[in-house]
């Protein structure tokens, strides 16, 4: 059984999402937005190290291979880890819009168990935009990019200012990210339009 709550239904006057002219071309890797990100960074030993690529329109594809550190039941991925993979893939869409946004709501359907060693093939797209609200959807397939859907999600991201991170993040990490001499890494830590 699956379903989406009314909070994730775009209003009738929602707009079609527009890919930013400077968005990476379809097929180009997006790279990690922040080395310490549990979802995509390579600085976290047990992180997901998810690698996303731009797709057509406002869409992305990504892969994540389940490792022993990601188990819930013996030999199976933890559902929260799979939700994280979906959240991260959906979050990477904002780089194609050049919008800073955070997950407000994430609704997940777990349709098949995902064994350790499996590569999850993820696809996500923005479906609508209404003011600060960005509506999006994602699937994770197993056995190949055309394999059966194991997990899926619908989400609402809410656009925020960079102050969101500066005000709420722990000072030492904020300072380290802002003092990074690499300008691209500095802006991407907060996904700010460079
Ligand atoms: C650096 C960039 C990151 C990129 C990578 C990300 C990958 C992973 C993504 C994440 O996991 S982000 C981390 C997890 N999320 C958070 O920590 C967000 C915590 N929540 C908040 O900070 C605030 O609740 C939030 C910014 C989402 C909203 O607060 P605001 O005060 O800015 O907005 P407001 O409450 O005025 O709501 C704005 C609109 O969004 C709607 N909204 C907000 N939260 C909602 C919700 N949870 N469900 C449904 N609708 C929601 C709200 O109804 C309203 O609709 P209307 O404009 O039609 O009135």
Image (cartoon, grey):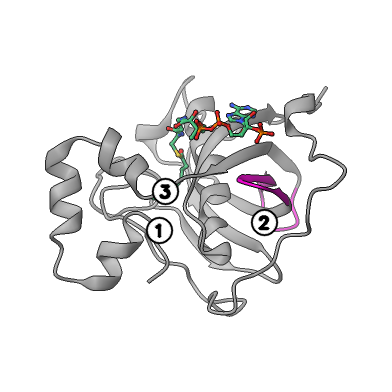
Mark seen at residue 161 = 3
State the CA–CA distance, disc 1 to disc 3.
10 Å
Mark seen at residue 136 = none
> Looking at the image, which is closer to me, 191 or 154?
191
Q: Is residue 27 magenta?
A: no
Tell me the residue at 55%/32% (across/down). Answer: 104
- Classify residue 93 as left or right of residue 37: right
State the CA–CA distance, disc 1 to disc 2.
30 Å
Mark seen at residue 144 = 2
Q: Where does label 1 land, which residue? A: 191
CA neighbours of label 3 inside 10 A, class few (<14), some (14 to 19), many (20+):
few
**Residue mark closest to the camera, 1 vs 2:** 1
Please say if 107 is above or below 55.
above
Residue extent of the magenta highlight:
129-147
Tell me the residue at 35%/54% (across/down). Answer: 190
Q: Is residue 133 magenta?
A: yes
CA neighbours of label 2 inside 10 A, class few (<14), some (14 to 19), many (20+):
few
């Amino acid at each position: 059984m699956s379903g989406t709550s009314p909070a994730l239904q775009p209003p009738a006057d929602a707009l079609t999402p527009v890919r930013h002219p400077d968005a990476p071309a379809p097929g180009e890797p997006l790279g990690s937005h922040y080395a310490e990100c549990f979802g995509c960074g390579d600085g976290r030993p047990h992180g997901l190290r998810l690698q996303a690529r731009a797709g057509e329109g406002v869409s992305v594809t990504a892969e994540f291979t389940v490792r022993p550190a990601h188990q819930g039941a013996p030999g199976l991925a933890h559902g929260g880890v799979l939700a994280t993979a979906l959240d991260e893939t959906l979050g990477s869409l904002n780089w194609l819009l050049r919008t800073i946004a955070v997950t407000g709501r994430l609704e997940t359907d777990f349709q098949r168990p995902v064994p350790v060693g499996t590569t999850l093939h993820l696809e996500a797209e923005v479906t609508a935009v209404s003011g600060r609200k960005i509506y999006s959807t994602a699937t994770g397939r197993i056995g190949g990019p055309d394999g059966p859907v194991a997990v899926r999600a619908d989400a609402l991201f809410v656009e925020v200012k960079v102050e969101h991170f500066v005000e709420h993040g722990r000072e030492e990490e904020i300072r380290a990210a802002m003092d990074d001499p690499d300008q691209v890494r500095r802006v991407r830590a907060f996904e700010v339009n460079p």
